[in-house]
Amino acid sequence: MSALPAIIGFRKDRIGARLIGLLNILRLGRKFGLPARYVWLSEPGGPYPELVDPREFLEAGFVADHIAVVDRAPDLSGRTDLMTLAPTINDAHMARRLAGGELFFSDIAFDVLHFMGEPAPEARAGIAAIAADLPLAPRLARALARAENRLSRLVPGGLAQASAIHMRRGDLLDGDPWSLGAWPAKYVPDEFFRAWAAGQEGAVIVFTDTPAAAHHMAAGDRRIVPIDRLLDLEKLTATERDMLELLLMARCRRIGGPGGSAFSRAAASLGSAEIVMLPQQLPTPRRGEAYQALLDRAIEAPDSFLAPGDLAQSLHYAARHAIAQGQAGRLAEALEGQGALMAAHPFVRRIHAECLLAAGQQDRARAAAQDALADPRLVGRDQRLCRGVLSVMEARAAPDSGDVAEQFLAAVFSQPAGENAQTAHMAAMLLGRDGPVAQALMFPPALTAGLLERNEAGLSLLAPWFYLADWEELLDDEAARRPLLAGPAMHLKLRRLGPAPREADHALTEGTTPPPPASEIEAQRIGLGAAILSLHGRYARALRILHWLDDIRPGDPLVKKRLADTCFRLGNVARAEDFLAEALELAGKPPLLQVSMARRLAAMGRPIRARNHIRMALKQWPDSGFLKRQGRRVRRTLAEAASDGPGEGAAAG
């Protein structure tokens, strides 16, 4: 592993995700003029035994030059995560860091990695150019030529005039552990595929990991053709078939499929096909009709689904529509008789609880959520959603209770930012009032009303980047922080704050002094705008605003905290520590600021002071599971720092 270059890619995943990762790494190598390699995990006894040898579908010399085949995951310690870093720095900054000897890795699997200021279409064009020259293994190249020749005769207008459906089924239907959880980002029910196909001209070819599912969905519509009706794929290995289908999909005009599928995105990267995410990008009237048809079928004809797992995965969408349209009680009653389905697919109990809550049946919703949580097979995301059902009920009943604040903070800081709508709904309820949650997060409640959105069910939601921009260091890891950057573009987040942040930013950039904020709420909007600028790597702009605010509002601890965050991101640790210490004093040393200082000190290998700050936080909130969990994160970081070398002197320890 020591021979790996400065930029590597790695992801333990299926072929589509690995292919996107490989293409991104090759582009970065070309962009910065240095070697870059994709680390390919080969595990014959692992979850992806079909991916043991990339030479099965790529030319052997190409693999030798660009891919490192390994039998264990690489050590990524000491390497910076490019998925999180790239949106915050430009390519010149990246080049300087590479020249300085820094090491990086990327686990990107669903999109094109590009840097601040680098146009995304330009990056995608670079990926497409590399993909066009990707050298295939000889056997696969011959199979592709035969398939293209046959399809040119069987499909009117050839593949270039056809549309493709990517239908993910397989182990999501009945394969543990995958079928134990809901996969809405990867699973599209039949109704949405049929609705999309009805709007396409020409042939619609279905590519799937489960041929029976394609035939079931296409029944009665001669325009929808499963690929195995056109080609004999039986003689190919599983990897060859997957890669052949990727290449054929890439040659189609457009691809309709799940938005969270690396397979269809990889196909689009290999060619010029347009990706249509289903059901999100269906035309509005057709989408609503498909949702209602799915809900009706789930209630009235549950046996019409291909398999119990097909019904279970489809229920996520049916429930979403039922809740939005006031039909949650109808679906909840239908699910009462689905005990066998709930036993096979535990997440269905969670869906049942959400429908009962939306129907106003709180006691039954509580019981259903507790039943779901009692099943040890319930996966983490569904556990958090079930706890969210219980927490929402408690928050509605007692929004200012300490228990509710504890539950909310524990949820927010133990999951990826913005993972579910329940947390966003609780944020809207709790941060709009001067209660313990707003006080803990130092969030001005007056800001909340202007930042709320409503979902399809009419629930008020507060997006996480507004209340976590000041606390990203308390999230577990880079993966949990990514959604803060991956949400709407920075300018769209800032737009929600009104004109004041933009006007202050413009004046300071031009070298003039803005007029003082007209009101307290305007000052808070400007400060939050600076926090969002800093979060997105616009450090100079953020610092200009924050120093100006600090001059005119010298006693504002949140301004000091934001100055500290920006200096930490810039690597100016000494100045950052000073600002954070000032914030602590000005704010009266509240628990979350204590934890923030502890997390920062732990990252610097300063165990004595880090532990002291955690202890002081726990004195104020002694029974807090949230703070105890943060303490465990501090101890873990200190242990990692100790293994790398001494921090504060042993005599001081």
Image (tube, helix red, strand yellow):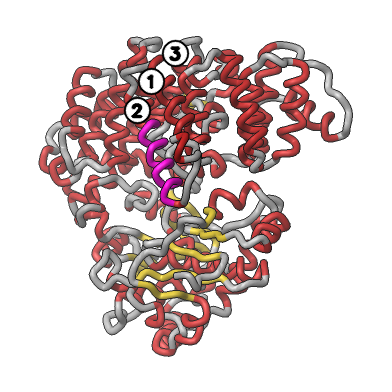
Q: Amino acid at mark 2?
A: Lys
Q: Which mark is residue 436?
A: 3
| Label 3 packing within 10 angstroms: few (<14), some (14-19), many (20+) | some
At x 67%, y 36%, the residue is: 533
User: How far across and down, in percent of the image, does residue 16 sit?
Assistant: 42, 65
Measured Cα–Cα span from mark 3 to mark 1 = 16 Å
Residue 628, numbered label: 2
On the image, numbered disc 1 is attached to which residue?
A: 618
Q: Please tell me whether mark 2 sits on a helix, a strand or a loop.
A: helix
| Mark whose residue sits in front, 3 or 1 | 1
The secondary structure that dominates the magenta segment is helix
Tell which of 292 and 445 is nearer to you: 445
Other residues around mark 1 within 10 Å, as few (<14) / some (14–19) / many (≥20): many
Say whether residue 631 is magenta: yes
Q: Amino acid at mark 3?
A: Pro
Judging depth in this view, the residue of 479 and 118 nearest the camera is 479
Mark 2 or mark 1: name the one nearer the start of the chain.
1
